Image: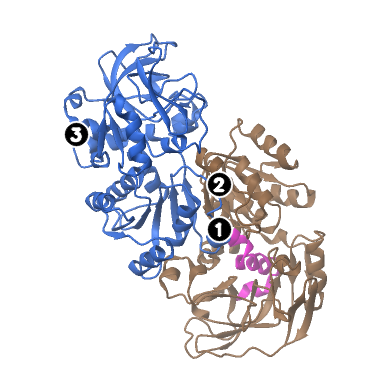
Chain colours: A blue, B brown
Amino acid sequence: MRATTIHAPFDIRIEEVPDPVVQHPTDVVLRVLRACVCGSDLWAYRGESERRPGQRIGHEFLGVVEEVGAGVTGFAPGDLAVAPFVWSDGTCDYCAEGLTTSCPQGGFWGTPGSDGGQGEAVRVPFADGTLVKLPADAAGDDRLLTALLALSDVLGTGHHAAVGAGVTAGSIVAVVGDGAVGLCGVLAAKRLGAERIIALGRHPARTDIARAFGATDVVAERGEAAVAAVHELTKGQGAHAVIEAVGTEQSMRTAVSVVRDGGSIGYVGVPHGSGGGLDLGVMFDRNIALRGGVAPVRTYIPQLLPDVLDGTLDPSPVFDLAVGLDGVPDGYRAMDERTALKVLVKP
Amino acid sequence: MRATTIHAPFDIRIEEVPDPVVQHPTDVVLRVLRACVCGSDLWAYRGESERRPGQRIGHEFLGVVEEVGAGVTGFAPGDLAVAPFVWSDGTCDYCAEGLTTSCPQGGFWGTPGSDGGQGEAVRVPFADGTLVKLPADAAGDDRLLTALLALSDVLGTGHHAAVGAGVTAGSIVAVVGDGAVGLCGVLAAKRLGAERIIALGRHPARTDIARAFGATDVVAERGEAAVAAVHELTKGQGAHAVIEAVGTEQSMRTAVSVVRDGGSIGYVGVPHGSGGGLDLGVMFDRNIALRGGVAPVRTYIPQLLPDVLDGTLDPSPVFDLAVGLDGVPDGYRAMDERTALKVLVKP
């Protein structure tokens, strides 16, 4: 089959790789219908996260079950299913509690020995624990299929940030990061009943989506001016809940600066530059909580799925460029140059 | 009157200072019956927190109301009352929400222009917002008076750590720090229904108190060995809730190492060496939350007071040395050298 590989920074290729087959009784082989490129893939693309030359890439996909291991009970060939960005066994203590990302048997798509999502097919380990079945008729609805794909990562990750930030009915929320996760954070905050959602961002194409998703205010300023603008909107106090969806020291510093005393930062941006943006002395004096991390989206998919299926939750606008498998390298380039927000892949 | 002053590192004196008087209608003058020395006073004592020469010190006290401003409605001369370690107006948004430490009119005892707790009397600003009345007959019960004094800081701070760590019925809790706050954290965790409480500490006098307060296990090892011991006790997973009651980089590193994936660190040790002990990458991968800060003990006093009054919550054993005002310099020395756990002052 053909799949995406990364050979060096900025060197993404589409290559012939071995067809996936069932290796363990709990495996399923899934034919990929939709995949996409994640903001976190760009860390590898830019060489900031190391990869072995030729390693697979891509961790967001949905598709049709093609082959089923003898030990799989929940799936049959022909089933439509979505995969979270981490596989998990579904049976350990952590999976039972919903923290599927801490499953000792879990792993990330594209790590050596596993398939990546940006390819024609994927061997899915622990399929019963990992995959979530989707209604078969969704396969014929292009818009819905795109929305469902967001369940594999960005929608669940935005939701995790909103939960970590402690968003409840009536909250004032600030969202740091105008990428797909930040925008899904807006959607999630709206769904959880936030009264006011302040999106920080300067790109009209993105802030327009933020407004469509429920942002009540947009702050286009940067740095100190952005902090001042958020304070201006919040009686000088800041936001109860801050969604941090970038992961840089600067974004964490902004998050600390715009959160209200006693509030929480829900952080889901993969941290780069460990801890440097956190002034623990400031957080201590102001009782600011930090809660989040890698999102256990497997747990959130069943919670969010009904709202996606009935259309009340529609993250599909975050995908603004669609490519075939051959277009994936261009897709990375477009996201790296910020000419695309999020690239949909139709293998 | 006589009060404690600090002139330079390790230079604590008892000096004659102006008698406090009502300066604002919302003031009360309180004659101090009991005060104490806090672990956080040692940061100033050791010169790690700057103080002006001659500045007052001490932020934990209870006493009898002596003089009352015209605007005070809740107190009359003769009332017994305890002060939290921060004064607050009781009327702002933050006070209304219980985050009294963020009151814009709040302040710390001993800051220039205010009295410190380690003296004969204190002018209490915003007395209605700040003080909490105690039953008059407690004044005749030495053990009870000592227990009630802990409400001014260490008991409420230990409780704040337990709340921040998310302790609930059935939790496995680890406590980093064997000072008075850590020990009060044990008490608070027990009160909140923790099933297992692992106290980290090497000093038998302190770990004996921890056991008496409800610790089910004591880990006397340090560093890596301590982490291994906690994992040994917890199926290799760590504690759901970790109370961090020290504030150094090392203690924060230990807290991160002993917390279970998805767990929380309730931090109340005043941070020294900002953020260095926090590896945000590890916290992200393991979904570890950090929640705490300067404890709004004014809010906790009414919640904890009934249990202290009926004896179900008795923090008095943390006080292991009692001095008069003249003995305060010796008290600092004893705490600095760890020959005393917590020094009670009877002016």
Image mark for residue A274: 2
Label 2: element kind: loop
Task: Give me the residue at 63% from left, 57% from top.
Answer: B269
Asked if labels 2 and 1 touch by Cβ distance under 8 angstroms, the answer is no
In the rendered image, residue B287 lying in the magenta stretch gets the answer no
Residue type at mark 3: give it.
Arg
Secondary-structure class at tag 1: loop
Q: Is residue B120 visible?
A: yes
Q: Is residue B110 left or right of residue A339?
A: right
| Crowd rating for badge 1 (residues with CA inside 10 Å; few <14, some 14–19, many 20+) | some
- Which chain is home to disc 3? A
Distance (Cα) linking label 1 and label 2: 12 Å
Q: Residue at x 37, y 64 (%)?
A: A230
Front in this rendered view, residue A50 or A254: A50
Magenta region: B136-157
Front in this rendered view, residue B342 or B109: B109
Q: Which residue is mark 3?
A: A143
Q: Nearer the viewer, residue B321 or B277?
A: B277
Residue under pointer 1: A279
Identified by mark 1, the residue type is Asp
Residue A78 drawn above or below residue B233 = above
